[in-house]
Amino acid sequence: MRSNPYLSFNGQCEEAFRFYEECLGGKIAMLMTYGSSPTAAQAPPEWHGKILHVTFDLGESLLQGADALPGHYVKPQGFSVVLNMDDPAEAERVFDALAHEGTVELPLQQTFWAKRFGILVDRFGIPWTMNCAAPM
């Protein structure tokens, strides 16, 4: 069994996942709009260009997401997407990229358990936790 985050957006899903491609180096494996789906008639016409489902391949991990239908979006809270990395320089690069136009809640720093650890909310409202663990 595997689990992965499924992120909800308020109309910016495609923009967010294109941004994640740049920041994380993964690849969008599947992207479907409401208008190109068999359920197009159930979505408002102005939402046909929005994303019904996206799958983003990060190698051994996946991120998935969609644009919530109008009136159904809820701001993300109570979780974060955790990125575990080995290389402090790469952790800094990814953290800085994701933080662009977002909010840094805890700057990336060395801790007693990690070479680098930090928390941010990206410009799309998605919370991220960066962990670059120190060898035990």
Image: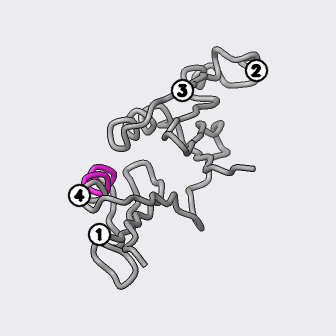
Other-residue count near label 1 (Cα within 10 Å), few / some / many at <14 / 14–19 / ≥20: many
Other-residue count near label 3 (Cα within 10 Å), few / some / many at <14 / 14–19 / ≥20: few
Q: How many marks?
A: 4
Disc assigned to residue 89: 4
Seen from the viewer's position, the closer of residues 80 and 83 is 83
When asked about the image quadrant of residue 32, the answer is top right
Q: Nearer the viewer, mark 1 or mark 2?
A: 1
Q: SS at mark 2?
A: loop
Kindly check if marks 2 and 3 are in contact, taking CB atoms under 8 A apart as contact.
no
Q: Nearer the viewer, mark 2 or mark 4?
A: 4
Q: SS at mark 3?
A: strand
Q: CA distance from mark 3 to mark 1?
A: 30 Å
Q: CA distance from mark 2 to mark 3?
A: 21 Å
What residue does disc 1 label? 108
Q: Earlier in the sequence, mark 1 or mark 4?
A: 4
Q: Nearer the viewer, mark 4 or mark 3?
A: 4
Q: Earlier in the sequence, mark 2 or mark 4?
A: 2
Up-down relation of residue 48 to residue 61 (above or below): above
Q: SS at mark 4?
A: helix
